[in-house]
Image (cartoon, grey):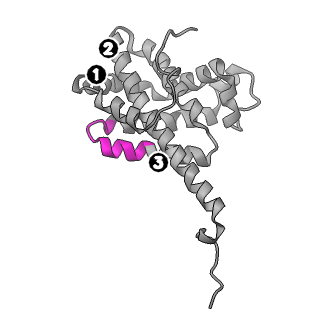
Amino acid sequence: MGCAISGLAAKPEFGEKSTEAAAAHLSEDQIQMIKESWKVIRDDIAKVGIIMFVRLFETHPECKDVFFLFRDVEDLERLRTSRELRAHGLRVMSFIEKSVARLDQLERLEALALELGKSHYRYNAPPKYYSYVGAEFICAVQPILKERWTAELEEAWKTLFLYVTGLMKQGYQEESNRHRHLAASPKERPDKKNTAL
């Protein structure tokens, strides 16, 4: 059950410049290819979500540590039939769908991805895993798209995932910095009551 994909999960850490560069390199043709392929993928989103996460846990078992529900599950068949995994897969697919819908409105896509990165900080899901999901998504959709899958389409999806995961990492870092700042200066915390008269 192999999927030869390179250039996504092995990318170095992102900074703001690299995410902007990825967005700048997403051409109109790539945006159209992604949107057209999504119309086909959308019919199988639950299936893709499950395949994507089962593959993720197969290829990167350390990712299960982030999911307390799946942490100790070794049986892949149990994962494939898990309602919780299906629900999480659908949430991720919903995010991808929203990302595709916002490809013509990058500021809205940026806000969405930054917020998702911030929420992943709160879930204690570190950025080192984000790019793995994109790689497994690409492997999961290839058989669904069949002859529609091309090297150009793969490059378009990779570019989108590089952009989105870069923004998520930025959001994660912003939330981490905010929490570090709050911890360093407890007198500024909003939950601290002012008892001065």
Contact, CB < 8 Å: mark 2 with mark 3?
no
Contact, CB < 8 Å: mark 2 with mark 1?
yes
User: Residue 152 bears which disc, if any?
Assistant: 2
**Where is residue 9 shown, x and y percent of the image?**
52, 22
Asked whether residue 57 is in view, the answer is yes
Magenta residues?
101-113
Q: Which residue carries the number 1 mark?
A: 33
On screen, residue 2 above or below 71: above
Q: Residue furthest right?
A: 72
Q: Which amino acid does label 3 sit on?
A: Glu
Write down the quadrant of residue 178 in the picture. Answer: bottom right
Lower position in the chain sequence, tag 1 or tag 3: 1
Q: How crowded is mark 3: few (under 14 residues within 10 Å), some or many (20 or more)?
A: some
User: Residue 157 bears which disc, if any?
Assistant: none
Q: What residue type is labelled 1?
A: Met
**Where is residue 191 shown, x and y percent of the image?**
62, 71
**Where is residue 119 shown, x and y percent of the image?**
54, 47
**Where is residue 137 shown, x and y percent of the image?**
48, 23
Of badges 1 and 3, nearer the viewer stands 3
Alpha carbon separation for disc pair 1 and 3: 26 Å
Q: In this view, does 170 lie to the left or right of 149?
A: right
Asked whether residue 150 is in view, the answer is no
Lower position in the chain sequence, tag 2 or tag 3: 3
**Quarter of the image containing the C terminus?**
bottom right
Q: Residues within 10 Å of mark 1 (few under 14, many from 20)?
A: some
